[in-house]
Image (spheres, rainbow, N blue to C red):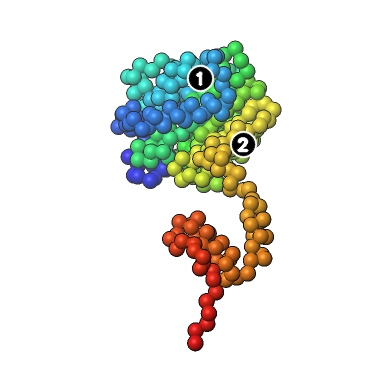
Amino acid sequence: MASRGRRPELQGPPELYYDKNEARKYVRNSRMIDVQIKMTGRALELLCVPEDKPCYVLDIGCGTGLSGDYLSDEGHYWVGIDISPAMLDEALDRETQGDVILGDMGQGIPFKPGTFDACIRKKVEDEFPRTGGKETFHAHLLETLFGPVFISAVQWLCNANKKSDIPAKRLYCFFSSLYSVLVRGGRAVLQLYPENSEQLELITTQATRAGFTGGVVVDYPNSAKAKKFYLCLFSGPSASLPEGLSEDTEEEKPAESTFTAGRIPYRIARRGVVRKSREWVLEKKARRRRQGKEVRPDTQYTGRKRKPRF
């Protein structure tokens, strides 16, 4: 088991890390299930999937099938691939509606070219560093030109668990096979938590080398816990990237970057006020009252000059 705060992909090969104990935690942790549902829905939003048309989904890194259950509830069909036998056994015990296959995405996606129309990916390992976790899925949209594919384990390809493992080659093999199984014009959304900028550059470089266009969308960029990276890829002509979510409301945004000249006339009017005069004193007392400070009431003696003492 990974210790708290350590990334699961640094603990060893995924087929060993995700054993029976980890698989049981996946289906018993209510918070993890809730995160899976939210991230799956967010991935579908980024793909702009029509609500009235079913998708045929390829879930790469399907795990116990939590994302697949959400897809089934939304009326989609799916097939899952995972490298962990224990996770797939748990999915079969839960009698998920989708089919599951044992396989390593680092060796390519075993489907015919042009099978899928789009790809989505999400990852929850870093949401739950103690138990790990990964959920991803790919999808083929029926009767339309768009559909989702969802993946969740790309970061595992950035680590070499054997001497023969070369991260750049495994990433390129994955992205090139993904590009092949997508129809031209298809989309892919990969939700990931890069360990550092170098790892993010490695992933995006291999995706671009495979033929993809697109970019990175960041949700909640100013939040330490809610911040999420989405790699949006297009297998055809480059399209505009979706906007990332933000904690700032529409009313707060103008206040952060807009300057006002509301006090300028007030300041100009004060230029002719003589210091220590009655007008100056009354203005100062009024300002302190607006600040919530305790001020003595105004009288006919307020601001009146006193005679010098003998």
Q: Nearer the viewer, residue 254 or 300?
A: 300
Q: Amino acid at mark 1?
A: Val
Could you tell me the amino acid type at mark 2? Gly
Q: Which residue shows up at 44% across the image and 17% down it? A: 72
The residue to which callout 1 is attached is 57
The answer to whether residue 170 is seen in the rendering is: no
Percent coordinates x, y for residue 148 in the rendering: 55, 23
Q: Which residue is mark 2?
A: 215
* Mark 2 residue element: strand
Residue 60 position within the rendered picture, expressed as x and y whole percent measured from the top left: 48, 26
Residue 69 in percent (x, y) is at 41, 20
Identified at 50% across, 29% down, the residue is 42
Q: Is residue 302 visible?
A: yes
Residue situated furthest front in the rendering: 300
Residue 79 at x, y percent in the picture: 47, 19
Give 206 or 72, whichever is nearer the viewer. Answer: 72
Instruction: Work out how far the residue at label 2 is from the one at label 1, CA to CA, in angstroms.
Output: 23 Å
Q: Is residue 267 left or right of residue 221?
A: right
Toward the viewer: 284 or 141? 284
